[in-house]
Amino acid sequence: MKRSHGAGRSATTLADDSRSADAVLGRRRVLLLNATYEPLTAISMRRAIVLMLRDRADVVHDDPNGPLVHSADRSLSVPSVIRLRTYVRVPYRAQVPMTRAALMHRDRFRCGYCGGKADTIDHVQPRDRGGGHGWENCVACCASCNHRKADRLLSEIGWTLRTEPRAPQGRHWRLLSTLKEVDPMWSRYLDLDAA
């Protein structure tokens, strides 16, 4: 009797393996640098592999613990950081968009009131009292402080902010505004202290 899928594996098992491989390929991010080493964006593992195979990008930082991708004739280690071979002009946007991820990164995942681990966002001047939804009025906050403050002003409860909230500066913040997690290997390419 002839087996169609080799080594006794069923078609369902092979389909499950390819789906889990696709999930890993889609989840993992690779930092893409411009030819000048300026961070551009975080791309999928699949896109990084395509750029490398088409000789559009070079590996800058290899990830020794990263996954291997196999084809019929070669094996590739998926890098953590790649760099484009040619310079790409990026239009400059003066305003960094405020997202939850960017706000958490700006405040280093610490509560603006007590310094504990932040898990939510708070408006310093509540919106129902005329406060806006912008960089200067929002801080990362722990659930406990957010609940205790509720919709009151800081002067009403005698609290102060640990630091004055302001909009972050630098091009890398556009990248950080789209990411929940940052690979530690990226830190030398991102100026995380320039908040």
Image (cartoon, rainbow, N blue to C red):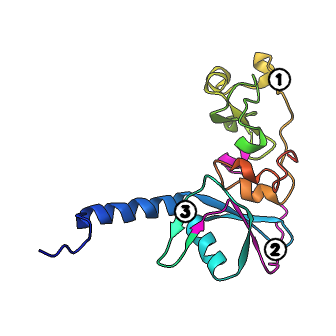
Which is nearer the eye, 149 or 171?
Answer: 171
Asked if residue 96 can be seen in this view, the reply is no
Q: Position of residue 126 (x, y in %)?
A: 70, 34
Is residue 28 visible in this depiction of the protein? yes
What residue is disc 2 on?
91
Element under label 3? strand
State which quarter of the image contains the N terminus.
bottom left
| Magenta highlight: main SS | loop
Q: Position of residue 79 (x, y in %)?
A: 66, 62
How many other residues sit within 10 Å of disc 1, few (<14), some (14-19) or many (≥20)?
A: few
- Residue 116: x, y in percent? 71, 24
User: Contact (CB < 8 A) between labels 2 and 3?
Assistant: no
- At horizontal 85% and vertical 51% (from top left) the residue drawn is 191
Q: Which residues are magenta?
A: 76-103
Mark whose residue sits in front, 1 or 2: 2
Q: Which residue is identified by label 3?
A: 68
Picture quadrant where residue 74 is located: bottom right
Q: CA distance from mark 2 to mark 3?
A: 35 Å
Residue receiving disc 1: 160
Where is 191 relative to 149, above or below?
below
Q: Quadrant of residue 35?
A: bottom right
Crowdedness of circle 2 by 10 Å Cα count: few (<14), some, many (20+)? few
Counting residues from the N terminus, which is met first, the one under dot 2 or under dot 3? 3
Query: Which residue is rendered at x = 63% and y = 35% of the image?
Result: 120
Work out whether 114 lies above or below 164: above
The residue lying at 76 percent from left, 30 percent from top is 112
Residue 155 is left or right of residue 103, and the answer is right
Q: CA distance from mark 1 to mark 3?
A: 50 Å
